Amino acid sequence: PAALSRVARRADGWLPVAVPGGGAFDASAINGPLARIRELAEGYGREPGAIDTVLRINPTATASLDDIVTTIARTAGETDIDHVFVDLMYIAGDADHALELAEKVLSAAR
């Protein structure tokens, strides 16, 4: 797709998405496009490893803490993603709840 070519040609990073609670985690949905981005980047004369990768984790309202932590663990073990961040907006009721959930996710993921 053209979007992958644009990332390879000029972007500093790529931000794929995973949705815990929305179906099974599929590492190939990340690894395939990432391999293509790196291949294209090399063709454009860029260092493929210079393109940073950050997985955005968007849990559904029904996702459990275990779903989120499993997605983080599988990302670390099955992909070449450099970083992850978890967007808690669909599961946190307010800022205090978001902080509580973030603490639980960090604790469980370590």
Image (cartoon, rainbow, N blue to C red):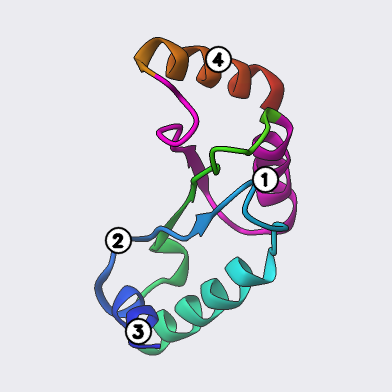
Residue 99 or residue 31, whichever sits in front: 99
Q: Is residue 88 magenta?
A: yes
The magenta-colored residue range is 66-93
Provide the residue designation for mark 1: 71
x, y percentage for residue 11?
28, 67
Residue at image point 65% right, 41% down: 72
Q: Nearer the viewer, mark 2 or mark 4?
A: 4
| Disc ID at residue 33 | none
- Residue extending farthest to the left is 10
Residue 44 or residue 88, whichever sits in front: 88
For label 3, the SS is helix
102, above or below 61, in the image: above
x, y percentage for residue 74?
73, 49
Callout 4 touching callout 1 (CB < 8 Å)? no
11, above or below 72, in the image: below
Provide the residue designation for mark 3: 5
N-term-proximal mark, 4 vs 1: 1
Provide the residue designation for mark 2: 12
Distance between mark 1 and mark 2 Cα atoms:
24 Å
Q: Residues within 10 Å of mark 1 (few under 14, many from 20)?
A: many
Kind of residue indicated by mark 2: Asp
Kind of residue indicated by mark 4: Glu
